[in-house]
Image (cartoon, rainbow, N blue to C red):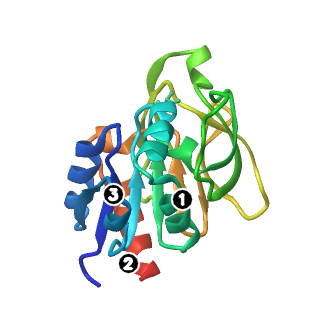
Amino acid sequence: MSTPTIGVLALQGDVREHLTALATADALARPVRRPEELDDLDGLVIPGGESTTMSKLAVVFGMLEPLREFVRSGKPVYGTCAGMIMLADKLLDGRADQETLGGIDMIVRRNAFGRQNESFEAAVEVAGIAGGAVQGVFIRAPWVESTGAVVEVLASYDGHTVAVRQGNVLATSFHPELTGDHRVHAYFVDMVRAGA
Ligand code: GLN
């Protein structure tokens, strides 16, 4: 599989930027809104946006269980910011009725940096990404409050975990899709190639 097909969950959020980043990283990228569109994907990206809205729309569109099933299937999934929140097994400061998909044994605190700083950029060293720090764009970003034993911490900022991987599931608090530096997407595309 030289060119994997990777979906971007397109219920809400910065879908277009992920499609562009994935295409630049040599994947065939396409938006996904319906359960049957998950069927022939090799991997999936869950974009940044607003996790409470994304959760609500996933329920309305009948996507919640199919997405959980996709994550359970072991196919690679990458979530940025709101997407990280969606991949958390446990959530703090979520809305009462907010659903996540789960997939990473971690507790994520929603809007965690937001209490100090609405949005900011910072250089972040990410384990497994060669070529120096990536520019982390944090927008009302979550952080990872704690992780289970099987979770690899790939990056921290200011003492807080901001990038993690558990098997084939990857998540970052920040938005590499907004920077024009597509190394994190290339890392994910490599995960998808290896996972096939
Ligand atoms: N604060 C948003 C949420 O709770 C996430 C922000 C983002 O994705 N940039 O979903």
Q: Secondary structure at mark 2?
A: helix
Q: CA distance from mark 3 to mark 1?
A: 12 Å
Question: Image quadrant for the N terminus?
Answer: bottom left
Residue 162 placed where, x, y %?
58, 41
The residue closer to the viewer here, 20 or 152, is 20
Residue 126 shows up from this direction? no
Q: Name the residue carrying label 1.
A: 65
Neighbor class of circle 3 (other Cα within 10 Å; few <14, some 14-19, many 20+) is: some
Q: CA distance from mark 2 to mark 1?
A: 25 Å
Residue at figure coordinates x 37%, y 44% from the top left? 176
Position of 95 with respect to 146 (left or right) is left
Q: Nearer the viewer, mark 2 or mark 1?
A: 1
Q: Mark 2 and mark 1 in contact? Answer it, CB < 8 Å.
A: no
Count of marks placed on residues? 3
Q: Name the residue carrying label 3.
A: 34
Residue at figure coordinates x 25%, y 67% from the top left? 27
Residue type beneath disc 2:
Arg
Tell whether circle 1 marks a residue whose Cβ is less than 8 angstroms from ligand 1: no
Neighbor class of circle 2 (other Cα within 10 Å; few <14, some 14-19, many 20+) is: some
Q: Mark 3 and mark 1 in contact? Answer it, CB < 8 Å.
A: no
Position of 74 with respect to 6 (left or right) is right
Residue 33 shows up from this direction? yes
Q: Mark 2 and mark 3 in contact? Answer it, CB < 8 Å.
A: no
Task: Point out the residue furthest to the right here.
Answer: 149
Residue at figure coordinates x 58%, y 52% from the top left? 101
| Residue 15, label in figure | none
Residue type beneath disc 1:
Glu
**Mark 2 or 3 closer to N-term?**
3
Residue 91 placed where, x, y %?
68, 38
Q: Quadrant of residue 6?
A: bottom left
| Residue 193, label in figure | 2
